[in-house]
Image: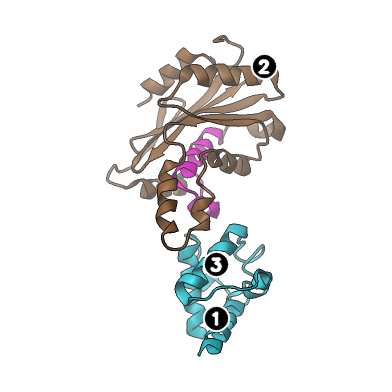
Chain colours: A cyan, B brown
Amino acid sequence: MEQLMADLKKQIIEQLNLQEVTPESIGNDEPLFKEGLGLDSIDALELIVLLQQHYNIRIANPEQGPEIFYSIRSMAEFIVAQQTAKA
Amino acid sequence: MNSAEAYITGSCIIRDHGIWLNGALLWEADRGMDLQEWLRAGYDRFSGQYPKFHKMDALSKLGWLAAEVLLKHAPVQALPPEAVGMVLSNRSGSLDTDIRYYATVKDIASPALFVYTLPNIVMGEICIRHGFKGENTFFVSENFDPTLMSTYPVQLLATTPLQACLCGWVEVMGEDYEVALFLTEKMPRGQALPLTATALQDIYQNTK
């Protein structure tokens, strides 16, 4: 889980072009939207693309978005759950 | 209609990796840099603390940077938001970003690129940064058209609530780019020049 969260931080910085953010500055539990990283609705779409590109995961129910993308940890837990379900 | 019904109160020209403010060279960087490197260096030098800059396409970055330099000491910030408008133009529209976006469609289309596939988005980015809410229009023309860029703002300043209007040219295609951004106002201020096609052309041509 720790490695997955570290990978996610790097991938998010690259995908969202967060040039003034370092992986170390992103907390595992801090909110990604509004507070924290202050991401917006376009960033949310880019996070969906990130899940597809890097983890081959499609979000079937868009209403799950706020829950899945709440923080780095919630994203990682969602990825692990999806991968476990597929295995 | 080319009369002194409005005034040019400032100009910012960006070309050849240099930035000129009101005719004077403000900054020139190594011409070996590619455009994105140069834009980042310009952002670091003249702004910073605006992370959204990095998400913009090259067209928006160029217009945003020119506005940042031009408006730093201009008192238009004190005007009501509805009193500042914008009239911009260029040759290539958003084609530079359209092509980049099209390349992503083959895989997974990029939402972040898609939002920049209209040329007038550069005006939105400038408005968001400075809080402007006045009328704005984007034209596409083969070359910088000083007649259009004088008559239209003059008319806006005479017939609408606008008291100031940014106007000019913001062009980019690949590594080729050029910005000529003018601040025009209803009332003269400082070294103001009458807003005429001749005055705009003179600044556009002779600032280098």
Q: Magenta residues: mostly which secondary structure?
A: helix
Task: Measure the alpha-carbon separation of dots 3 and 2.
Answer: 47 Å
Image quadrant containing the C terminus of chain B: top left
Say which residue label 1 marks. Answer: A79
Placement of A43 over or under A79, stated as above or below? above
Say which residue label 2 marks. Answer: B158
Taking the spot 43% from the left edge, 42% from the top edge, the residue there is: B95
Task: Measure the alpha-carbon separation of dots 2 and 1.
Answer: 59 Å
Q: Choose between B83 and B49: the one closer to the eye.
A: B83
Tell me where residue A84 appears, x and y as whole percent.
54, 89
Chain bearing mark 3: A
Q: Choose between B48 and B127: the one closer to the eye.
A: B127
Taking the spot 59% from the left edge, 41% from the top edge, the residue there is: B124
Taking the spot 52% from the left edge, 76% from the top edge, the residue there is: A57
Q: Choose between A51 and B63: the one closer to the eye.
A: A51
To the question of a shared chain for discs 3 and 2, the answer is no
Circle nearer the viewer, 2 or 1: 1
Say which residue label 3 marks. Answer: A47
Indicate yes or no whether the magenta region holds residue B183. Answer: no
- The amino acid on which the numbered mark 2 sits, given as a three-letter code, is Ala
Chain bearing mark 1: A
Going from N to C along the chain, the mark reached first, 3 or 1, is 3
- Cβ–Cβ under 8 Å for marks 3 and 2: no
- The amino acid on which the numbered mark 1 sits, given as a three-letter code, is Ile
Query: What's drawn in magenta, residue-wise?
Result: B47-71
Indicate yes or no whether the magenta region holds residue B68. Answer: yes
Secondary structure found at label 3: helix
- Badge 3 crowding class, 10 Å Cα cut-off, few under 14, some 14 to 19, many 20 or more, is many
Chain bearing mark 2: B
Tell me where residue A5 appears, x and y as whole percent.
52, 79
